Every structure is written in C-alpha cells, then in structure tokens.
Amino acid sequence: MSLPPHDPLLNARLAGYTRKGFSARYQACRPKPPGALVELLLRLAGTRRPHVVVDLGSGTGISTRIWAAHARQVIGVEPLDEMREIAETGDQFPNVEFRPGVAQRTGLPAASADIVTCAQSLHHAEPQGTLAEVDRILKVGGVFAAYDYDWPPLVHWEVELAFAEFISRVHELRARHGIRSEQQRWSKEEHVERMRRSSMFRYLKEIVLHNTEPCTAERLIGFACSIGFVLPVLDLGLPDDELGLTPLREISARVLGDTGLPWHVSYRVRVGVK
C-alpha cells in the first residue's frame, strides 16, 4: 500500500503554531540571528548588496528583517497565515515583503535569489523537495544557509538546570497522556549530509556563530512555552505546579531579577555555495 503524497502545508500546520496567541509569544521571546551571520553570507555570496534574499519558513519575520538594511529586495515565504500576520504587522520596510508559500513551492522565478536562508525551519520541511526548490531559485554562485540555535540559550546555570527539569516534566506528561506528534520532522543533525547528497553545492561547511541579547524571567518563560512539543501539554490546562513551571518561574525571577541577564545564543549554521 503506497503512502499518501506529502502535504507541506498540512505538515506545517501540525506543528501547532496556529494556536491563538502563539505567534505573538514567538515574536516576543525567540532570539534574533547574529549580525555576523549577515556579514558571512554577504562575503560568501560575493556581494555587499544582494538583489534578492529569500527567507524560507520566515515565521514572524525575525530572520527576515535582519536583511532589510543589506538587500534590495527581501522576501519571506511562510505557509502559516497566523505567523505571517504577525510579520506583516511588525516593523515595516519598503524592501521587505512576506508571501504565502511552502519551501518546496515558493512561486519565485528561477535563478532569482542571491541568498536563501532557512532559520529554525528546515527540520519542518521535507528536505528533497526543499533543496530542489532552493536549487531552482538560487543563482549560480548564490548562498544557502540553514541555521538553528541551541536551546535553551545560556543565561545562568541554575536557570538552565530548572529549564531541563521543566522539559523532563513535559516529556513525562506527554507519555502519561498519550500525546504523540503527528507532524513529520527531519533531524537537524542530518542537514549537512542531506545538503551534501544533493550535489548542488561546490562548497559546504558547518560553523557556529554567537549572539548576546538581554533575557528577563518573562522572556525565558515565554521561550519555554513556545517550544513545539511543549504546546500540547499546555493545552491540558494543568496548574503550573503540575506542569513544572512554578520552580522555573521562581528560579528565573530570583536569578535574573528585574532587569535580566545577558543571554548567550549559539547558532549552528550549515552553509553552501551553489
């Protein structure tokens, strides 16, 4: 019996990111890419001002707007209306636009992009079709970068231990309540090998970049509650004590105080030159 054809839009919706209020929390609490990433990709692409930069799975626009001051045209492609609406109501730039679409079918012209990125999104996208579409829209000599951050970002050891306890509790609750993910995902650890097997890149490398931002207790809790596999557990409506959120809240408030502490975010960047 053959499997039904893969549906990228349905798979995106199965991430759970369409919940009410989720997109705004995501925008407020998730970290922003480092400026060094922009500088690196511009250098590899051999241009100081690319004509077109495309951000696949652009979400609320966090990874798209970083290009506003550097490219003539920036296009964020996002399948989820709920995420794209937040992007369209945020800071606006005349050279930045957001379009509906999936990574496998962007609707963009062939050989039109100087740089294509997937920020914290390639593991949600069926890879063979995605890389084929990247190959189609990317110019020869253009650059593709798929990057993800390690989580939680480092802010303080006590907070990180409390965060780990919360995540452990989430896994226990998922098992107890029989929660299973219906979304198909692909391992981030295999991004480089899949890019290599595509044979579309003359140069391929994985590097680590870093960014530092302020982190308050509110932001940390918001980040914890915006993780995909946490969402269905929050839907159970359990009290914070049972969810394991109370210790994380208390420790974060005590350690981070009223003003917060620096949040050190590590990005794993898989970059290829076509």
Image (cartoon, rainbow, N blue to C red):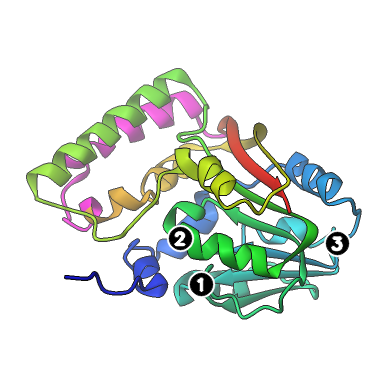
Q: Which mark is residue 50?
A: 3
Residue 166, above or below 228: above
In the rendered structure, which disc, 2 or 3, sits on the residue that comes first in sequence? Answer: 3
In the image, taking residue 36 as reference, residue 130 lies left or right, namely: left
| Residue 270 position in % (x across, y down) | 62, 42
Residue at position x 46%, y 24% in the image: 255
- In space, the residues marked 2 and 1 are separated at their CA atoms by 8 Å
In the image, taking residue 123 as reference, residue 250 lies left or right, namely: left
In the rendered structure, which disc, 3 or 1, sits on the residue that comes first in sequence? Answer: 3
Residue at position x 90%, y 54% in the image: 47
In the image, taking residue 111 as reference, residue 197 lies left or right, namely: left
Q: Which mark is residue 125?
A: 2
Q: Which amino acid lies under the numbered mark 2 shown in the image of this protein? A: Ala
Disc 1 packing (10 Å; few <14; some 14–19; many ≥20): many
Q: Which amino acid lies under the numbered mark 3 shown in the image of this protein? A: Pro
- Residue closest to the eye, 135 or 89: 135
In the rendered structure, which disc, 2 or 1, sits on the residue that comes first in sequence? Answer: 1
In the image, taking residue 136 as reference, residue 190 lies left or right, namely: left
Q: Secondary structure at mark 2?
A: loop
**For mark 1, what is the residue?**
102
Range covered by the magenta-colored residues: 233-259
Residue at position x 77%, y 39% in the image: 36
- In space, the residues marked 2 and 3 are separated at their CA atoms by 25 Å
Disc 2 packing (10 Å; few <14; some 14–19; many ≥20): many
Q: Secondary structure at mark 3?
A: loop
Q: Are marks 2 and 1 in contact (CB under 8 Å)?
A: yes
- In space, the residues marked 3 and 1 are separated at their CA atoms by 23 Å
- Main SS type for the magenta part? helix
Quarter placement of the C terminus = bottom right
